[in-house]
Image (cartoon, rainbow, N blue to C red):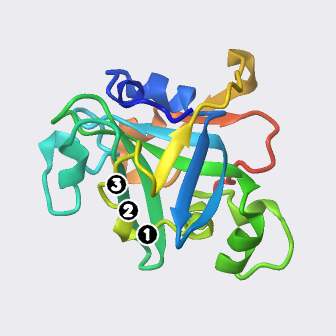
């Protein structure tokens, strides 16, 4: 079952980041279905989080989609080569987001390998936000995409993740955010090989 709009519009982005663990993320590109189980996320609060692109109500052409009502995708490019996929949450103008960092592939694995130019299934296929987007065919065309639509969506398949199976720690790559960099807003499934590794 696709996650409904009401899942995304809840006010607590940190809780949503945890709730997304165990949910399935899918894309359908050129008629090819690819996807898997979300195993790692990071929460970003738009109002008072120096690690967020929308901190202090910053509005640019890139971040404008963050101010829409929750339930759309926010895709941006880093290092000139990797697209990162975020789920926008909360009500309109709150600009909260959850970065999807790790995925355990379950559907369309052969297509994912082709997109990543890999020949065998290894964790680095989708263990990391940039590589998972490449494997799923996520690019700027999905900027602002409706997450209840047919291009990119998330599903609840009934997998219940016990709280004791979830680990939490500081987010990765946001050292510039000062004290906010230490917020334990990165969540992952313990002992899951598809979780990304910090550099």
The front one of 108 and 92 is: 108
Q: Are marks 2 and 1 in contact (CB under 8 Å)?
A: yes
Q: Is residue 69 above or below residue 193?
A: above
Name the residue carrying label 2: 142
Residue 36 at what x, y percent from top left? 68, 49
Name the residue carrying label 3: 145
Is residue 84 rendered to the left or right of residue 41?
Answer: left
Give the farthest residue toward the right. Answer: 120
Is residue 77 rendered to the left or right of residue 90?
Answer: right
Residue shown at 36%/43% (left/top)? Answer: 178
Q: Are marks 3 and 2 in contact (CB under 8 Å)?
A: yes
> In terms of secondary structure, where does tag 2 sit?
helix
The front one of 155 and 45 is: 155
Q: Is residue 77 above or below residue 50?
A: below
The picture quadrant where one finds residue 133 is bottom right
Residue shown at 71%/48% (left/top)? Answer: 195
Where is the N terminus found, in terms of image quarters?
A: top right
Is residue 51 rendered to the left or right of residue 132?
Answer: left
Q: Is residue 161 visible?
A: yes
Where is the C terminus found, in terms of image quarters?
A: bottom right
Is residue 107 rendered to the left or right of residue 134?
Answer: right
Q: Are marks 3 and 1 in contact (CB under 8 Å)?
A: no
Residue 168 at what x, y percent from top left? 61, 30
Of mark 3 and mark 1, the one earlier in the sequence is 1
Q: Give the class, few, some or many, for how many residues have Cα within 10 Å of label 1's Cα (few <14, many ≥20).
A: some
> In terms of secondary structure, where does tag 1 sit?
loop
What is the distance, in whole Å, between disc 2 and disc 1 at their CAs?
6 Å
Name the residue carrying label 1: 139
What is the distance, in whole Å, between disc 3 and disc 1 at their CAs?
11 Å
Q: Is residue 199 visible?
A: no
């Amino acid at each position: 079952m696709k996650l409904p709009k009401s899942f995304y519009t809840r006010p607590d982005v940190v809780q949503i980041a945890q709730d997304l663990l165990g949910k399935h993320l899918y894309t359908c590109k050129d008629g090819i279905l690819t996807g898997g189980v979300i195993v790692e996320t990071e929460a970003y609060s738009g109002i008072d989080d120096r690690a967020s692109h929308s901190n202090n109500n910053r509005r640019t052409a890139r971040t404008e989609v963050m101010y829409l009502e929750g339930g759309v995708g926010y895709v941006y490019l880093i290092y000139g080569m990797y697209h990162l996929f975020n789920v926008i949450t909360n009500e309109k103008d709150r600009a909260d987001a959850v970065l999807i960092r790790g995925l355990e592939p379950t559907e369309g694995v052969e297509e994912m390998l082709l997109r990543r130019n890999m020949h065998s299934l290894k964790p680095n296929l989708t263990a990391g936000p940039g590589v998972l987007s490449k494997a799923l065919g996520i690019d700027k065309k999905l900027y602002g995409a409706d997450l209840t639509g047919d291009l990119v969506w998330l599903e609840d398949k009934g997998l219940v993740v016990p709280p004791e199976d979830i680990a939490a720690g500081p987010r990765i790559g946001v050292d510039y955010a000062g004290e906010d960099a230490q917020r334990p807003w990165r969540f992952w499934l313990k002992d899951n090989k598809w979780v990304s590794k910090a550099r």
